Amino acid sequence: MNSRKASAAADRELTPPYARYLVPLIRPFPNFDLFFVKSLRQRAVRRLQLHPGDRVIDAGCGPGGSFPFLVDAVTQSGVVVGVEISPDMGLTAKKRVEKNGWTNVEVIVGDAKKVELQGTFDALLLLGAPDVYASPAALANLAPYLKRDARIVAFGAKLSHRGLGKAFNSIFRLLFSKATFSSTPQLDYEPWKTLESCVGALAVEELFFGWMFMAWSLRTRE
């Protein structure tokens, strides 16, 4: 019993604070996703310019909310690999895969800084994954698995330059720090810069009063 408790406690530490309360609520409903997040996922997947048969990594996949859109884009001839550090979130993602009968989706529970993958990939999605897109170590580990013309899209939080948003930056920064890991990079105005230094120039769109961003690579698919 003690070993089980220790294991559960360790798993909990690998789950972001906000998700520790969310996961038990959504696990009975594997396909649950917030309506406004769905539109962001769809937009991000469109930016990946995926084709049938493509192979895509969803790093920091969480409960697998982006899987339906990725599967639709790559079709059954393609492959989707989700990487998630939290065993609790990873289990929920696996339940989503099982519920939908996707045979071409794999969920790997592991740290993006160390995870080992098979083959090369046409695209990388980093949706709400600051511990990946702002981590030189994680990006260095994933980069060798990407094809030269691989498309990359990242979405996440940032500090705002805009009037209304800027006035509440300190509060937003505090809420972000409470909801994420202690190791998660602190919010700044251009959190995509680490990713840009790794993959090259990015196009960036600011959203939600400048508190969110979506960045995508300017590489052209061959």
Image: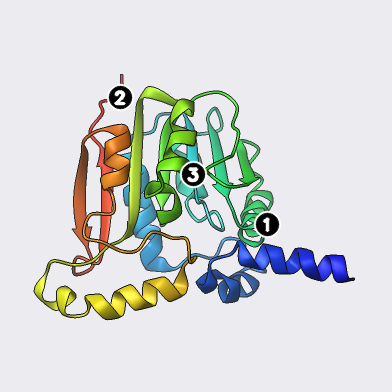
- Alpha carbon separation for disc pair 3 and 1: 15 Å
First along the sequence among labels 1 and 2: 1
* Residue furthest top in the image: 222
Q: Which residue is mark 1?
A: 91
Residue 117, percent across and down? 59, 31
Which three-letter amino acid code belongs to the residue tagged 3? Asp
Residue 190 is labelled as none
Q: Residue at x 19, y 67 (%)?
A: 160
Helix, strand or loop for disc 1: helix
Q: Nearer the viewer, residue 39 or 120?
A: 120
Which three-letter amino acid code belongs to the residue tagged 2? Arg
Relative to 85, is 75 above or below?
above
Q: Residue at x 61, y 54 (%)?
A: 93
Relative to 164, is 62 above or below?
above
First along the sequence among labels 3 and 1: 3
Q: Nearer the viewer, mark 2 or mark 3?
A: 3
Relative to 18, is 76 above or below?
above
- Alpha carbon separation for disc pair 1 and 2: 33 Å
Crowding around mark 2 (Cα neighbors within 10 Å: few <14, some 14 to 19, many 20+) is some
First along the sequence among labels 2 and 3: 3
Quadrant for the N terminus in the image: bottom right
Q: Which residue is mark 2?
A: 221
Residue 58 is labelled as 3
- Circles 3 and 1 in contact, beta carbons < 8 Å: no
Left of 64 or right of it: where is 167? Answer: left
Q: Nearer the viewer, residue 65 or 22?
A: 22
Q: Quadrant of residue 14?
A: bottom right
Relative to 137, is 77 above or below?
above
Helix, strand or loop for disc 3: strand
Q: Residue at x 61, y 58 (%)?
A: 86
Q: Quadrant of residue 15?
A: bottom right
